[in-house]
Image (tube, grey):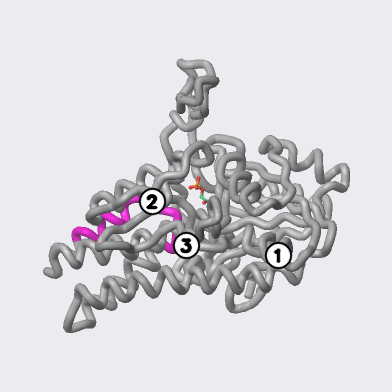
């Protein structure tokens, strides 16, 4: 993806350092965060400097490589693996990546070299998979469509291209005129901040709407398709994605709007029989109580936006049952969720 005319990946390895686009600063500032060791990489996942299924997966892969380069003893590697896996529990790509790099290193004579090669392969595969998802998903997009997406499953959520936004980019580049409704304005505002920033960079017409406006626009006939990403897909086709996704799916079913989930096959967890087995991350209630933004002087500020002594809860994901999903778009093809 290009930012100010320069091509960027979200996660990349350079001069023995893991480099990440600092997503907590967007859309206000574009900065790069350096992770010198696996502990810093864990912190970056934990504090959401990097977030999104594929971007977390690639970061976890390089974090494993960093740990193995630091010390390739069995006990050290296992301890680091557990620390990386403890950062965020829902995103399947994280576990896919740690297991794959771990296995590649354990099976190799030169563990350090094998770990880094494997991490790089995971990042490159993520790019190729998302590119293919874009081409396949574009087949479902008709010129003139209004498309709603929830949260950010764009290139920032992956190494490049994105999942839910990849078909939108592909449609735009193939000359189709589309308009995107953008939500997830709360609690973290990943739609309003990240998706809107990505679409603006690409010159794609879009409008930010409050999270609870989807049913209203659907009732007016102003949504032709909903497309979202996924953090984990269970074997029966149930999908974990950003909190609020299930509500969009209910709206889609009510109004007969196709509801697509776009995700690389690395997001599918065949060990989870249904969505009931997917762990849902509970994040700090402060993300509900406070909001961050630019003040009039252009400085980042965090302010309280609710009654200070009320209880608050912050589940980060919900489960959309497979029966609400039209198709799951992967790099291997489009599937009915039950298949
Ligand atoms: O708030 P986040 O960034 O942790 O939300 C998670 C996600 O990135 C979304 O659920 C996204 O739609 C799927 S990941 C491509």
Residue that appears at 54% across and 51% down? 4
Q: Quadrant of residue 61?
A: bottom left
**Residue placed under numbered mark 1 in the picture:** 173
Q: Is mark 2 within 8 Å of ligand 1?
A: yes
Q: Quadrant of the C terminus?
A: bottom right
Q: Main secondary structure of the magenta part?
A: helix
Q: Nearer the viewer, mark 1 or mark 3?
A: 1
Distance from Cα at disc 2 to Cα at disc 1: 34 Å
Relative to 223, residue 61 above or below: below
Q: What is the number of the mark on residue 88?
A: 2
Q: Quadrant of residue 173?
A: bottom right
Is residue 98 rendered to the left or right of residue 296? left
Residues drawn in magenta: 79-93
Count residues near mark 1 (Cα–Cα under 10 Å), then give few for <14, some for 14-19, many for 20+. few
* Front residue of this view, candidates 144 and 283: 144
**Residue placed under numbered mark 3 in the picture:** 159
């Amino acid at each position: 993806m290009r930012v100010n005319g320069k091509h960027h990946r979200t996660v990349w390895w350079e001069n023995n350092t893991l480099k990440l686009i600092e997503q907590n600063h967007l859309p206000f500032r574009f900065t790069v965060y350096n992770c010198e060791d696996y502990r810093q990489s864990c912190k970056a996942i934990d504090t959401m400097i990097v977030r999104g299924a594929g971007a977390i997966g690639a970061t976890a892969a390089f974090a494993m490589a960093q740990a193995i380069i630091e010390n390739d003893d069995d006990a050290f590697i296992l301890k680091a693996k557990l620390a990386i896996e403890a950062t965020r529990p829902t995103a399947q790509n994280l576990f896919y990546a740690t297991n794959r790099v771990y296995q590649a290193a354990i099976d190799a004579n030169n563990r350090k070299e094998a770990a880094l090669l494997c991490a790089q392969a995971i990042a490159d595969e993520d790019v190729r998979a998302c590119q293919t998802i874009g081409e396949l998903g574009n087949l479902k997009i008709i010129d003139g469509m209004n498309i709603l997406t929830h949260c950010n499953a764009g290139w920032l959520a992956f190494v490049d291209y994105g999942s839910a936004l990849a078909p939108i980019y592909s449609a735009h580049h193939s000359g189709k005129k589309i308009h995107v409704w953008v939500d997830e304005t709360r609690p973290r505002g990943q739609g309003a901040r990240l998706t809107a920033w990505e679409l603006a960079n690409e010159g794609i017409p879009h409008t930010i709407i409050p999270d609870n406006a989807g049913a209203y626009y659907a009732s007016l006939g102003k949504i032709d398709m909903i497309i979202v990403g996924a953090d984990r897909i269970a074997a029966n086709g149930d999908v974990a994605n950003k909190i609020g996704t299930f509500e969009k799916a209910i709206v889609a079913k009510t109004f007969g709007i196709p509801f697509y989930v776009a995700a690389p096959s690395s997001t599918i967890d065949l060990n989870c029989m249904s969505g009931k087995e997917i762990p849902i991350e509970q994040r700090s209630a402060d993300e509900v109580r406070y909001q961050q933004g630019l003040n009039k002087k252009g400085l980042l500020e965090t302010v309280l936006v609710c009654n200070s002594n009320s209880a608050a809860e912050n589940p980060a994901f919900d489960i959309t049952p497979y029966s609400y999903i039209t198709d799951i778009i992967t790099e291997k093809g489009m599937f009915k969720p039950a298949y």
